[in-house]
Image (tube, grey):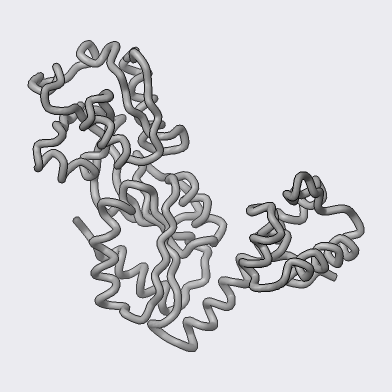
Amino acid sequence: MFNLQQLKILVLLAEHKKLTVVAGLLNIKQPSVTFHMKKLEQAAGVPLFIQRHKLIFLTEEGKALHHFASRIVSWTEEAQQVLSDYAHFKKGKIIVGSSNTPATYFLPKLLGKMREVYPEVNIIVQVKNSPQIVDMVKKFEIDFGLVAENKIVDPDLVITPLVNDELGLVVYPGHRLADVEKIGPEHLQNEYWILRDQDSSSRRMMEVWAGQQLIESKGDIELGTTEAIKRAVICRLGISLLSRLAVEDEVRNGQLIYKSLDSGLLSRGIFFIYNKNRFMTPIVEEFIGFFESMRF
């Protein structure tokens, strides 16, 4: 029969694909990892791993087992955290997931307040794109999330809006559109655009809006973070659609110019989300109450 250590190894190998990395994460020797892999395959009765060029991949049978193993490992870790929370009320660990915009421009303010109220709680923040944060909340991999989205509808989630935001046109001072009072689609044709990566919510919103407005570009540059895009616009590499919250400092300092495009397609909010089916420990309940009481 499988044991928890064997399932952890399978889950970690699926993610990292290297024996040395998995051994380090579990604080065991590499031969121990190999031993548990063989024992797991013996118990399963089918091959679970394939080694190629010092990397470990899962077979189709291994992928099928991973579907269940990842949940078992996640639930076990949650159960351990639940017991720890009860044993040490207001101590322990909270994992917050956040998409890029709230993590950079909104969450730091909250973290300061959280640290004052819960000084002995270890707060871990994981920053990923909004769809990934939603998926992690649904899989119980994190306690709750902060995401910037146009809207969220999901029967498994409790969703609380925290602050309104929008995507607007961002140009550098001296750009031909800097002094145009009302920007229309005709002003935005054949510009060089600086874009977020394909998986980001702001990129999806921008593409829907641009498609509706029939906007053509001269060429695009794709960058992975909002901060990188702001630097690129300041350096006159192009224009972009960015969060109003994300450019407040640069607009105040005169480095960028922000213009609202008055489109419902570009309106969005920062939402606090958690899985309504998760087990509520005292710490989690207090943190949920903390977030839901915040309004900006």
Residue 158: tell me if it is visible.
Answer: no
- Residue that appears at 76% across and 45% down: 53
Quarter of the picture containing the C terminus is bottom left
Residue 293: % across, % down:
26, 65
Instruction: Kindly identify the residue that appears in the image at 34 percent across and 51 percent down.
Output: 271
Residue 147 drawn at (x, y percent): 37, 49
Q: Position of residue 51 (x, y in %)?
A: 80, 49
Front-most of residues 228 and 65: 228
Left or right of residue 91, residue 113 in this image: left
In the rendered image, the vertical position of residue 132 relative to residue 89, given as above or below: above
Which of 119 and 234 lies nearest the eye of the viewer?
Answer: 234
From what the image shows, is residue 166 above or below residue 89?
above
Q: Write down the quadrant of residue 146 in the picture.
A: bottom left
For this rendering, which residue is in front, 77 or 282? 77
The answer to whether residue 50 is seen in the rendering is yes
Q: Quadrant of residue 22?
A: bottom right
